[in-house]
Every structure is written in C-alpha cells, then in structure tokens.
Image: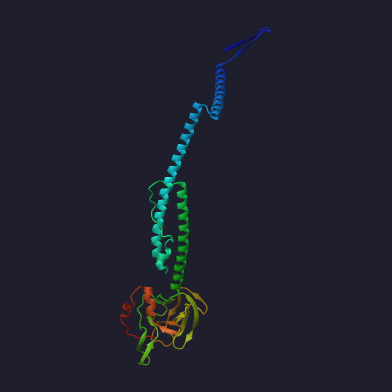
Amino acid sequence: MHLIITDARLARSHAIHLSGGKLVLVGLLSSFVLMLMSAALYHWVFLKGAREGWPVIGSLVRLVVKDEFDQRDRFMRANLDAMARKLGEMQAKLVRLDSLGERVSGLAGIGAGDFKAPSGQGGVLIMGHSLSLEELQATLAEMDKLTDQRVDLLTVIESRLFDQKVRSMMIPTQEPVPGHMTGSSFGWRIDPFTGRSALHTGLDFPGAVGTPILAAAGGVVVTQQFHPEYGNMVEIDHGNHLITRYAHTFKVFVKQGDLVKRGQVIAQIGTTGRSTGPHLHFEVLVDSIWQDPQKFLAMGRGMPEMARAQSPPRAMQQR
C-alpha cells in the first residue's frame, strides 16, 4: 500500500509504503488507543454521574452495589451456617467427652459431678434460625471456656491415675515365682523340724535350685545378708511401712540400697538356712507385723482369695 503526502507550501510530496504486517500493527495500535480513550471517557462519565446523582447512572450504581452486597451476604450466610453445623458437632463431642469423663473420674477417685460444667448446660446445637455472627462468637467463647475446664479436670484425672498406678506398682501383687503352686501357706502348721504347732509366717514356692525369683513390687533393698534361719535373705522396702522378705535363696543379684522394679529378677531359689529342700520362703510385713501374702497376690492374679486357699497341699512341708 502506498500513501503520498503532498505539502502545497513547499511544493513537495512524500511517499509512504505500508506492507501487510505494518497495516495490521497500525490497526492494532489504533484499536488499543481507541479502547483506552473509550474506557477513560466511560470512567469519567460514570464517576461524574455517580457523584452528581444522574438518574440512570445512580440507579445502575445502586443495582451493582446491591447485587454485590447480596452476593457477599449469601457467602457469609453460607459460611456462618457451615460453622454453626460444625459447632453443633463439636458440642455433641463435648457431651460424649463429659460422659466419658464421668466414668473415668470414678476410676480416679473424683466425684462424677465434679466433671460437669458449673452451668449445667450442654447438648447438641439445635437452631430454629440461622445464627448471627455475634451469637456464633458468643457460643464459641462459651465452648472455649468449657474446653478449658475439661482440660483442667482431665489433667487432675491424669495425675490421680498416674499416682494410683505408681502406688499399685509399690504393692506386692507380683508372684515372686510365677506359675508355681505354693507349698506351705500362711498360718499355723506342724513344724517339719520340731513336729509341734508353729506359725508359718509366709508362703513357700517350691522350685529347682537356680529358679529366678522376682520382686513382688518396686522398692529399695534394705537388707541383703545371711540369716541363721532365713539363709540368704533379701528384704525390699516398698514404702508405707510395707516390706517383702525373700528367704533361703541360692544366689542374690541385688545389694542393700539398690532400687528394684516390679518383676525384676533379684535372686535364685535355694535351700540355705532352716530349710528342708529348695524353695522360696516369701513374707509380707506391715509395720513389722506378718501379713498373709495371699491377700496381696490375689489382687495381682485377679483371683478370689478363697480359690487359692483351697489349693491342694504339698506332701512336703517347707519353711
């Protein structure tokens, strides 16, 4: 394409040659400039009409703003309803947590009523109308308060249960020779050496020499010595004036002052001291008074005490 530009004053002319690519580029630039001018003019007219309250433009602005607010309100309402449903589910979980907490609190020695909220409120969130943002915030704040109370109470329960577990580990309920029937039981019997009636102060666990002996509970070794009657003897202090004694042992693996835990191997069965054969003589003392070890071992085995009291007696009586 050729364009000829003529200047009458100078009596000159100038020719411009435009190829196809240049024509397309000129067209695009012209369109872009026209669009910018149109947008600027529309923006100026629209703003001026909105400021001065032109009827048509003012109505259009109100419609646009109203539609935008309606969309925003629908979006917020949908989110509030979803949050309210989630809040209802959380409240239902709190109710189940309360029920579980009441049962667990009984195990910890805490009154079930102590686990309930002071206000006595609860239950699933059932709404007759949609919650407002303020109502939702108030409900969330109340749930946050109740959750803090539950956390505090569960912390107390955890502490109580841990304390009970520690105390249970310090009570001699572990059989010192597992799976072995006892020989002589606690109480009066005919002494195998004198043939006279005498008090047998513990339980006898027969076994081969070298059979492991376990600590009936955790504690501190307070005695490890040879005794004329008890032979190689170990005594463990479990606190609260409670001591267990292990007599006639063959070999001892602990010494005075050692900390031992429940079920730890502390010695081996032997026949040292006043004994008629290899066995463990096991005693439990509270305030230096002999107690029937069956009362303690019964708790560990989960069996009625009378069921073990009726176990068949051994032919050989041992001390």
Drawn side of residue 7 relative to residue 164, left or right = right
Which residue is outermost to the right? Answer: 10
**Residue 110 position within the rendered picture, expressed as x and y whole percent measured from the top left:** 42, 68
Residue drawn at x 43%, y 65% is: 114
Q: Nearer the viewer, residue 106 or 122?
A: 122
Among the 4 quarters of the image, the one containing residue 249: bottom left
- Give how far across and how far down residue 115 sits, in percent: 42, 63
Residue 76 screen position, x and y as percent = 45, 42
Q: Is residue 46 above or below residue 314?
A: above
Q: Judge whether 51 appears above or below 125 on screen.
A: above
Work out whether residue 263 can be spotted: no
Residue 202 pos. (x, y %): 39, 83
Colouring chosen for the image of the structure? rainbow
User: Is residue 111 something that shows in the picture?
Assistant: yes
Between residue 178 and residue 136, name the one nearer to us.
Answer: 136
Numbered label tally? 0
State the quadrant of the C terminus.
bottom left
Q: Give the quadrant of the N terminus.
A: top right
In front here: 225 or 142?
142
Q: Quadrant of residue 119?
A: bottom left
Depth check: give the residue in front, 170 or 113: 113
Q: Is residue 272 above or below residue 75?
A: below
**Residue 99 located left or right of residue 27:** left
